[in-house]
Amino acid sequence: MNKKFLPLSATAFAVAIALAGCAGGSGTGSPATSSAGMDHGSSSATATSTATSSTAAAADHNAADVTFAQMMIPHHTQAVEMSDMMLKKDGIPAPVTALATTIKAAQGPEIQTMTGWLSGWNEPAMMPAGHAGHSMNGMMSDADMKALDAAKGTEAARLFLKQMIAHHEGAIMMAKTENTAGKNADAVKLSKDIVTAQEAEIQEMQKLLATL
């Protein structure tokens, strides 16, 4: 994802969550009750049961869950792109290549998972156009990505590690917000997993930087 993003403060991310709630479709609306308790035959009862089940499923998330997924998907996508850049280069230290492989292997499936959640919640995969200006913490700019693409050997490895540390720090910030504000159990669990995994990877990257 090669769009330029500006840093986003924790306050701005909270505002993004609030705005997402205003966009509607956040699953916080009250279930339809007009047909509850009314039996006009088996077909009607089945339809009512289906509608109730759909409403319950949609209600199992809130605006924070939606914003978390909508923002983490492009964030993860860029991390995968950065990792792909490293995997295509020659002369990269093996531990750095291994780290890039690990990041891609973890975040690729998470992108698919979050995309599936948004689809199941009947939410757009991207934030509404009016809110798209809220960029994500830790995202690299076009210039950053071009610099990484052009770098070679040890220089590329160092740049990748420095950029990915900042990238992970941004993801951890967003994940911690979901951890405290989210409602969907799966989304909250993923946010906790992201914090655990990426904090450990930051420590690993800092150690690797010291050896280059």
Image (cartoon, grey):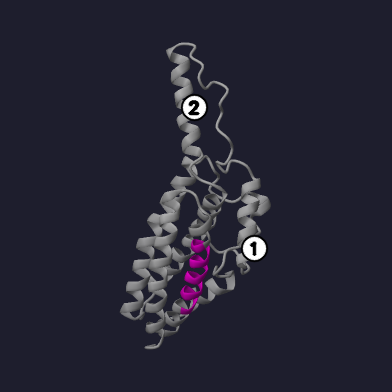
Q: Which mark is residue 12?
A: 1
Which residue is painted at 48% across and 22% down in the image?
48
* Depicted 140 relative to depicted 32: above or below: below
Q: CA distance from mark 1 to mark 2?
A: 36 Å
Task: Give the main secondary structure, helix, strand or loop, of the magenta stretch.
Answer: helix
Closest to the observer: 106 or 47? Answer: 47
* Depicted 197 relative to depicted 47: above or below: below
Residue 171: in magenta span: yes
Q: Residues within 10 Å of mark 1 (few under 14, many from 20)?
A: some
Q: Give residue 176's position: percent from left, percent from top.
A: 50, 63
What's under tag 1, amino acid-wise?
Ala
Q: Which comes sooner in the sequence, label 1 or label 2?
A: 1
- Element class at badge 1: helix
Q: Residues within 10 Å of mark 2 (few under 14, many from 20)?
A: some
In this picture, which residue range is highlighted in magenta?
162-176
Q: Which mark is residue 51?
A: 2
Residue 74: in magenta span: no
Which residue is painted at 41% across and 69% down in the image?
198
What's under tag 2, amino acid-wise?
Ala
Seen from this angle, which residue lies furthest right? 130
